[in-house]
Amino acid sequence: MPQVQACRRFGARILFVSVSAGDTHRAKVWGRLRRAGDVAAAAGVRIAIAPNIDFGRRGHTIETAITGDFRRQDTEIEDMMTSRSDRGVGEFPPRRFASCVFLLALLLTCPAGAQTSVARQWNDALLDAIRLDFPAPTVHARNLYHSSAAMWDAWASFDDSAQGVFYTDKTLSPADLAADRDEAISYAAYRVLSQRYTRAIDPIASQAIFDGLMGALGYDPGITITTGNSPAAIGNRIAARVLAETIHDGSNEIVGYQDNTNYAPLNDPMLLEFTGETDTTLDAPNHWQPLAFATRITQNGLEADLVQTFVSPNWGHVTPFALRPAPGQDPWTATDPGPPPQLGGAGDAEFRSNLVSVIRHSAVLDPALVSVPFDFGTVGLAAGASMMIDISPASLGNRALGTHADQGHAVNPSTGQPYVPQLVHLADYGRVMAEFWADGPESETPPGHWFALANDVADHPDIVKRIGGAGPVVSDLQWDVKVYLAVGGAVHDAAIAAWGSKRAYDYVRPISMIRHMGGLGQSSDPGDVATWHPNGLPLVPGLIELITTETTVTDGRHEHLAGFEGEVAIFAWSGEGEVPEDEVAGTRWIRAVEWWPYQRSTFVTPAFAAYVSGHSTFSRAAAEVLTEITGDPYFPGGLGEYFFPAEDFLEFELGPADDLTLQWATYRDAADEAGISRLFGGIHVAPDDFAGRIMGARIGLDAWAQAQTHFVPEPATGLCLVTLVIAARRRHPKRPETTIDN
């Protein structure tokens, strides 16, 4: 449990826990609390259940707190969970309970541990704040970059050769280099984050995190001086510079990141609960359609407006880190992918094929299936093949850029041995992948997810911290500030490039495609005049079929669809159940106009256009940076992995059916999987993914080259620096340990 680990890291002895609005089932909530108690007991942290913490308002009200070993207090907690007679058992009103909030300002009782660098602690604090906020990947990527730049500039101000991004003054005779650096970094990060999170969903909760860390580190937030050369003054001065130079960067931060491009959707909203009312009358079928909900909850459990509004359509204008567009062009155009396939236009056949592929991905999300009912190219399965597949790096990964062609890896280069096969059910793989990559394990959004992965890499016992894989081993602090600047710059530029493309091409999402085309009819047989439409769905036996009087007879495959003869049916995931955590929805024949992606019914699809995939762009950009800064395309030890226990991970339904471990040999393999996950999740079609990967690869390499100019500001260009680093890595792939360079 990350919150317990954070308490241990900060020295807290009590963790106040509340429940996410998304956790509406008592057994699931209670199971999580029990697991939290087990982890907390091992960490020496006490649990406090704090009901009625209203993070939807400006103040907090704690009516009751149950402290101590809550596992002995089942009655009190269950009474608390069902105390409102106007709610169902175990249900909580949205926004009433924040997600596992720990009020550090109240709880910290001893100094922070020295297990991680001060930069890492500030990054962890930011990730915790992201988890509490509205999940806008663009805004969070910007905050990750600017806070990272502030920490880098503070570190660089004490180094005679490193070059700051926003602040370039030097303090070269510190009284205590290590202590002064830590203090300057802390004040710089604290001021930037405190200012940025004044516009968070709950600024008080976020500020409590930042204040708590400052107190745990022994620093006084009340010191605001910016003159002189004290570490606090340097940090405050750096923060002021960063904030001043970015306030007019095109993000519209001053007015809450509001759109200033006059974006308006070309299509009316789809009324999700009224099938066929608005989803078959798209005025512009190649363009994004907002969704209208009965209840709408964000991925991290926050209540949202019932009708979607395009998030950050102005982001293609934001000042980048390393993107270099042609003169007079917006920053995003530096990696303009060109238009996606169009229904009824250029790429029409590809458009239809891509849509069929999304339905295929949906159709295999059933652990009861024994064999694949049709050809499934994503993992190279033919119709009739076993649903048990090898998901180890021996079979998956090592794909050519912008493809699904898995070549696998013959051996683990760290051990010299073949990768051990891991046979799992395709449905478990697809479902776990879709949920794991959705917004990160704790809803830190995709850019935050890659910071969390970078931190995991830094913690690995096999990591050797040489910048670019060459030169001396550096300190944890130097490693962290350099990784954060490069990864932060990459994900910031990825947000600009991806959202510029989303705004420019305004591409439709699969739910609108499938419901719209399915509502029009079929496009395969013009002889069937009653059901044919040129923009209908193509018929695919066993996957996309017409409902007929022959198929709705007793024991017919469409028997349960009697009354809808003449409509198009698809074999797909059947949608979220009444109690998702306790049941498996499985796959079956459903009306095409009622198709749901593999998502929560209160979320369904992100509130912005599809092309390109943000996940693919963020992930590949970050993966390229990690490849370059570690000097190795492989994860430490040749294997990155996350374990998921049977029936104890999925949120959208019960699962996985069996234990499963996602595994990747390389950072690029992990990034590719993030993109593929959106096909299983029903969020994207393949061109969204492929174009995002290609853009991300260039963005990541450009960000690394730009970061190098700050790390080693020599006359050589960034490209030359990258070439030198790669050459050095090839000459010296592994060097013995040397003295650590701070």
Image: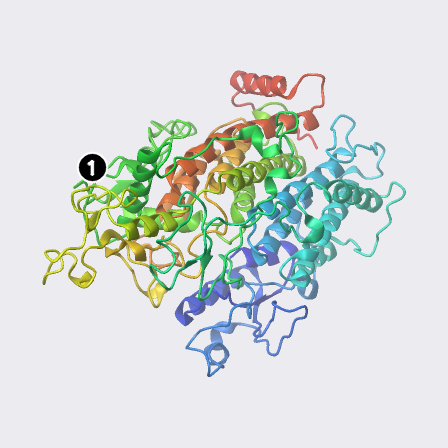
Side (left or right) of 321 relative to 226 = left
Relative image position of residue 114 (x, y in whole percent):
66, 48
Q: Nearer the viewer, residue 3 or 113?
A: 3
Q: Is residue 429 above or below residue 741?
A: below
Q: Amino acid at mark 1?
A: Ala
Relative image position of residue 663 (x, y in whole percent):
39, 40
Taking the view exactly as shown, the residue that stands out farthest to the right is 228
Q: Nearer the viewer, residue 58 or 392?
A: 58
- Which quarter of the picture shows residue 7? bottom right
CA neighbours of label 1 inside 10 A, class few (<14), some (14 to 19), many (20+): some
Side (left or right) of 603 relative to 211 = left
**SS class, disc 1:** loop
Q: Residue at left 41%, top 42%?
A: 286
- Which quarter of the picture shows residue 732? top right
Taking the view exactly as shown, the residue that stands out farthest to the front is 529
Q: How is the image coloured?
A: rainbow
Relative image position of residue 53 (x, y in whole percent):
60, 71
The residue under label 1 is 382
Q: Is residue 737 visible?
A: no
Q: Is residue 272 above or below residue 71?
A: above
Q: Residue at left 55%, top 43%?
A: 447
Q: Is residue 44 visible?
A: yes
Side (left or right) of 243 relative to 487 = right
Instruction: Give the tally of numbered discs.
Output: 1
Taking the view exactly as shown, the residue that stands out farthest to the bottom is 85
Q: Nearer the viewer, residue 550 or 676?
A: 550
Q: Residue at left 16%, top 43%?
A: 527
Quarter placement of the C terminus = top right
Q: Is residue 59 above or below residue 612?
A: below
Relative image position of residue 739 (x, y in whole percent):
66, 28
